[in-house]
C-alpha cells in the first residue's frame, strides 16, 4: 500500500514547503496573500500551509 505521515515539525515542514514552492512557484505566494486578505475581511486568521501530509506510495 504505502505510508502516510503528518508533518508538523519545523524542519520537515520547511522541507515540504520548499518542494511545493519549487513545483507551483508564484501560485503559492498569490494564494497565501489571498488567504491573508481573506483573514482581514473575515476578521479571523486563516491557516495556510501549517501542517503537511506526506504520502509515499509503494511501487
Image: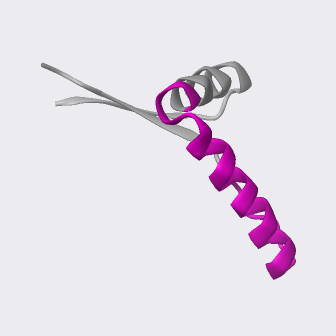
Q: Quadrant of residue 45?
A: bottom right
Q: Which of the 4 quarters of the picture holds residue 55?
A: top left
Judging from the image, the colouring scheme is: one colour
Q: Is residue 20 left or right of residue 31?
A: left
Secondary structure that dominates the magenta span: helix
Which residue is at a point 64% across and 28% down the rendered structure image? 13
The relative height of residue 8 versus residue 46 in the rendered view (above or below) is above
Please tell me which residue is depicted at 79% across the width and 61% down the height of the picture: 36
Residue 50 visible? The answer is no
Please check the rendered image and state whether residue 24 is part of the magenta-colored stretch, yes or no.
Answer: yes
The answer to whether 15 is drawn above or below residue 38 in the figure is above
Q: Position of residue 5 (x, y in %)?
A: 45, 32
Which contiguous range is marked in magenta? 21-48
Q: Nearer the viewer, residue 53 or 31?
A: 31
The x and y percentages for residue 12 are 62, 21
Q: Is residue 43 magenta?
A: yes
Give the residue displayed 16% in from the left and 30% down from the top.
1
Quick check: 54 above or below 28? above
Amino acid at each position: 500500500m504505502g505510508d502516510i505521515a503528518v508533518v508538523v515539525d519545523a524542519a520537515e515542514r520547511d522541507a515540504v514547503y520548499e518542494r511545493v514552492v519549487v513545483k507551483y512557484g508564484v501560485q503559492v505566494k498569490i494564494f497565501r496573500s489571498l488567504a491573508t486578505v481573506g483573514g482581514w475581511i473575515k476578521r479571523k486568521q486563516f491557516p495556510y500551509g501549517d501542517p503537511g501530509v506526506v504520502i509515499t506510495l509503494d511501487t
